[in-house]
Image: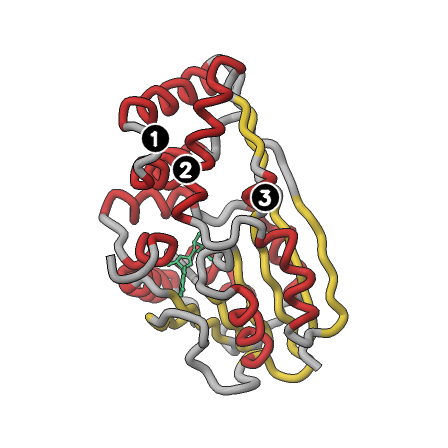
Amino acid sequence: MPEPYYKQHWIDIDADRQGAYDQILAFHPAMEPLLKPIELKSGMQVLDVGSGPGHTTLELARRVGDAGEVTGVDINAEFVARSTRRAKEAKVNAKFVNHAFPPLPFPDGSFDRVFCKNVLEYVDSAGETIVEMARVARRGGIVVAVDSDWEMLALDIGEAHRDLTDRVLAASKSIAIKEPRIGRRLYGLFLAAGLAAVKAEVMCGADVAGRSLPMLRSSLARYARDSGRVSAEEIARWLGAIDVAIRERKFFFVLPQFVVRGTRE
Ligand SMILES: C[S@@+](CC[C@H](N)C(=O)[O-])C[C@H]1O[C@@H](n2cnc3c(N)ncnc32)[C@H](O)[C@@H]1O
């Protein structure tokens, strides 16, 4: 593997996982509060840093309308190809660039708004990426990052599975995430990047219906298996226990989202 796992697992995404990300990263009305701090207006130029399958990018593009444009940038070539097709089908102004960051491949002051959701835990340097996000924002432009704090993840599928759950989650984080504490670090990193009027909020809903199952199955379980710290039999047992917990209404999952915004002076 030429790159560390936390990066390579985004470069290589097989067809199954591509499909899973369409579920995991679909836009949902419950995500509306995550977009509010960007204060989008018609006609704006927006950058979506780590745009993935592009579902959120298209949502941003709908809000800036025909006079505006959203640019997505992502390390995964297939995400870029698929989101380019989706933008064309949806008839919105969005274009996509295949590039690994940091650095970001845009001149200083190119965008009115810079948005980045659930990406900064995977990059070589979250601090340098936020400095780049500030650089490509125009003076007076708003920069927003939304991210999880993986050490605040809470999952209950029953006491009998507590140790296995802890082991699977620890194994997964050990290889797939460069900075599991990114959520709590965002505020300080925004200040360090020289952004002004920095504000942080934490948004957090409980999933008791199993909406997070595609993420647990296609991302966390796979990472744990690839870590070699948990056997295939244990992963299968864990996923089986999750299915039972969802059916028996004993499933409880929380992953707080830190939403931080700052202004480029
Ligand atoms: C969890 S997904 C989030 C996608 C999108 N922001 C969303 O919320 O729907 C993380 C995205 O970051 C991209 N990514 C991770 N590390 C990257 C890097 N170093 N350079 C560019 N993109 C990266 C991945 O390819 C993936 O699309």
Label 2 CA crowd tier, 10 Å (few <14, some 14–19, many 20+): many
Q: Residue 171 location, x and y as percent?
A: 41, 37
Residue positioned 51% across, 54% down in the render: 179
* Residue 233 visible, this orientation: yes
Q: Nearer the viewer, residue 60 or 97?
A: 97
**Left or right: residue 77 compared with residue 152:** left
Per the image, the residue denoted by label 2 is 171
Which residue has dot 1 on it?
230
Which of the marked residues, 2 or 3, is nearer the chain's N terminus?
Answer: 3
Q: In which quarter of the image is ligand 1?
A: bottom left
SS at badge 1: loop
Q: Cβ–Cβ below 8 Å for labels 2 and 1?
A: yes
Q: What whole-number distance in Å separates the C-alpha atoms at marks 1 and 3?
A: 34 Å
* Residue type at numbered disc 2: Ala
Residue 98 coordinates in the image, percent (x, y): 33, 70
The kind of residue on which mark 3 rests is Ala
The amino acid on which the numbered mark 1 sits, given as a three-letter code, is Val
Q: Which scheme is used to colour this image of the protein? A: secondary structure
Q: In this view, does 224 lie above or below 98?
A: above
Mark 1 CB within 8 Å of ligand 1: no
Disc 2, SS: helix
Label 2 and label 1: CA atoms lie apart by: 7 Å
Locate residue 73 relative to residue 225 in the image: left or right: right
Residue lying furthest front: 229
Residue under label 3, please give it: 30
The residue that appears at 54% across and 80% down in the rendered structure is: 136
Residue 67, position as x, y percentages in the image = 52, 78
Residue at the extreme right of the image, as rendered: 197
Q: Nearer the viewer, mark 1 or mark 3?
A: 1
